Image (cartoon, coloured by chain):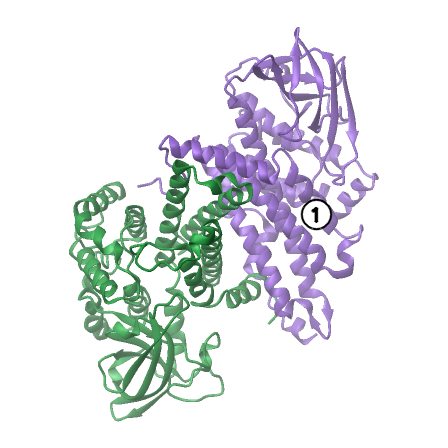
Amino acid sequence: MAHDPAPPLGEFRTRVRNWLEEKWPQIEPLTHARRGTAAYVDAQKRWMALRHEAGLATPHWPVRHGGSGLGLEHQIVAADEMARAGAPDSDLFIVSLNHFPATLLACGTEEQQQKFLPTVQQGAVWCQGFSEPNAGSDLASLTTRADLDGDEFVINGHKIWSSFSMYADYCILLARTSTGAKKHDGITFFLMDMKSPGIRVSPIKKSTGISEFGEMFLEGVRIPAANVVGQIDHGWAVCQVTLAAERGLLVFEELERQWYDTLSFFQSATRKGATWLEDDASRREFIELMAEVQANRLLVRKLLRSDGLNGTAQSLIAAFVKVLFSTSKQKLSDLLTRIECLGGQVEEGASRDGRGSPMRDYLASFGHTIAGGSNEIMRNIIAERGLGMPR
Amino acid sequence: MDRLARGRGRGPLLEHLISGVSANAPEEARIFFANVESVLSGTCSSRAIHDFVDGRADVDAQLWNAAASLGWFGLGISGEGPGSGLGVEGFVSFHRALGRFVAPGPYIATLSSLRVLSESNDAGALAPILSGGYDGRIALAVPASSDEARIELSGGKLSGRIRMLGARASAFVAHTYALVPVVSGDTASWALVDCAGSGVASGTLSMWDRTREVDDLTLERAEPLHVIADPAGSMAERLATYVSLAVAADSLGGAAAVAAKTVEYLNQRVQFGRPLGSFQALKHRAANLMLRIVTSEQLLAQGNNVLGRGSADAALWASLAKASATKAYSFVAGDCVQLHGGVGHTWEFDCHLYLKRARLNEVLWDSQSRAADRAGALLMKALRHGEAIGELDHGA
């Protein structure tokens, strides 16, 4: 479908919508898979295969790398239609679809692109090996070592918070190749095969009760020198591209889902005559939060269309989007949890058939306020880069 | 002092907050607003506003005369001068500019009324105002709160009492007309009445915010200049929409200005051997001001866009914009007092001017809860009728 040169937007929207409708009997069951289970991984892979079949897995990639070269506006339309339909997300492939390709397309060699980009279309799961127990917000202080031995680097160290690392085929890894005067110098960016000997993944259980991220213990892992992205010792500049990939379409699709979910929640409450609507405080708080979600949708569009702005302006808008999106998510799930009263405090077990529970959403929301650059770091960025407040 | 010497500059956000004029606006609008900014910087400087508030200068008259001679009232009436043709966006940007300078004058009421009257189906509505050409000779007043009781119309005469935004016959206008909500039996309408007419008395209420005027209007068998039927309440809704957007814009202009002044203060004020702005706690406070402002800005843009498109959900988004922007302004202005330390709550510094303007904005027309309820009711109605709410991507 999306293998043609860019169709007009209206036509493209119709095609995506029709495809979703046509395939819905196959797609809908995939929305019920519960996070943290093998069934979830399976459902994610099936959904990715369906998207790939329709040319909607990597539509924004250059044509020579298996994409359709579709521009931003088409991506927005596709993400919007999937959110509207309530199609599954592609969380298992977040790094595969965003962080990894953005980095490789910007900083990788032609050979690296030819070799590694197709893995995504083949359904490979990529994870990120950045943070360490002693290097979270202060990522540049990382100490995982990469020592050159012939034409390979030998990796020794310890990574943490790596999402879906237990299912990953590949990893984008930051390790220290030398110790210089500044901690940012001497870091190198690697592409690591997760089947390499010496990698041990240990899942970490979240407050929600599921284990989706984990620690990675790296002992004598060998990576070919050809898998260095960018220059040795200059990986910090490369990883800035990776971190910038957190912005944009990733948040856009989440925000669209949040909007449609919020609207439909309100609609069904209105139809049922839900009692919380009679409570002035709850009803007003809800309206206010709904307005915030809409404000965030508008802001992320500004971010997506900010290519004309300089890097500082873009990173500022991205910081705003990050804080506002994660905060709204937390406030909404917080309100909905309170609205459910005692019932909301019952952990769902099998009864909710994979649909979210507000309490679970609320607990999970801390992942968004803390990860991807904590909201505290974002506020530092806003103040220092945006308002010129002295460091 | 070393940190000051290193000087990081203002930062793009601060520059944007200070400048206030959108780089993306069309040429005509940019020129117009550069002009507006220039006049406001001169007429409504901090010193001038303090003098006005202390009763030493008639800044309101100076500004109104400048507005009239420069054709700014075209923002309310199309075809009249440079302001016309700038649409809803121009109306909104103008109030934002006024808010930045806490500029005095009955602009919210006048421009909102002019737009609503010119958009009504009643051809006679504007006649009393436009006869002889409009050049700011007439100021208009609207109810200060949507909660005010309607005026009774009986035997063609108006009786009742209502608090209005700007109903005193001002020295710098020939006439002030009040646009009052009227009830006659079960029939709702609006009436234009001359505030200096017989049977009309207005007493000025002494407001904390001295940059705006709220008056107690008493009508005793007063003769209306014109009555406009409003059986379905659509004119009431249009007026609510315009006033909400004007107040929201005023609020965001003011919030941006007081936040900018505060950040500049923090970056300059040195205590414990370092600028206050170098403390992380204060950086986060400043960032939080921006987060509120930026969020409300999006809602104002939404209200602006939907009204400009003539969309059915304009009233909904205008209400949400008003609620969000006024709450943000009160929060920002209050925190800016605190962030200034001792000087923050003095008469001499600017903070209290913004704070008082913010508190009045918060209750003008709709209170917070009334605005949320208005929006909630409109939302429920739209959902019941299967209308699309908040669609954003219209190109596709």
At 44% from the left and 48% from the top, the residue drawn is A298
Q: Which quarter of the figure is the C terminus of chain B placed in?
A: top left
Can residue B86 be seen? Answer: no
Report the number of numbered marks.
Answer: 1
Disc 1 packing (10 Å; few <14; some 14–19; many ≥20): many
The location of residue A160, given as percent across then percent down, is 38, 77
The location of residue A96, given as percent across then percent down, is 27, 67
Tell me: residue B123, above or below residue B24: above
* Image quadrant where residue A101 sits: bottom left
Q: Which quarter of the figure is the N terminus of chain B placed in?
A: bottom right
The location of residue B129, given as percent across then percent down, is 63, 18
Choose between A332 and A208: the one closer to the eye.
A208
Looking at the picture, which amino acid does disc 1 mark?
Leu
Asked if residue B377 lies left or right of residue B71, the reply is left
* Image quadrant where residue A34 sits: bottom left
At 27% from the left and 71% from the top, the residue drawn is A126
The location of residue A39, given as percent across then percent down, is 22, 63
* Image quadrant where residue B187 sits: top right
Q: Secondary structure at mark 1?
A: helix
Asked if residue B189 lies left or right of residue B162, the reply is left
Of the chain colours in the picture, the one used for chain B is: purple
Asked if residue A350 lies left or right of residue B360, the reply is left
Tell me: residue A269, above or below residue A248: above
Residue with the mark numbered 1: B355
At 65% from the left and 74% from the top, the residue drawn is B3
Query: Which residue occupies the extreme bottom position in the image?
Result: A149
Tell me: residue B49, above or below residue A161: above
Choose between B334 and A188: the one closer to the eye.
B334
Of the chain colours in the picture, the one used for chain A is: green
Asked if residue A216 lies left or right of residue B332, the reply is left
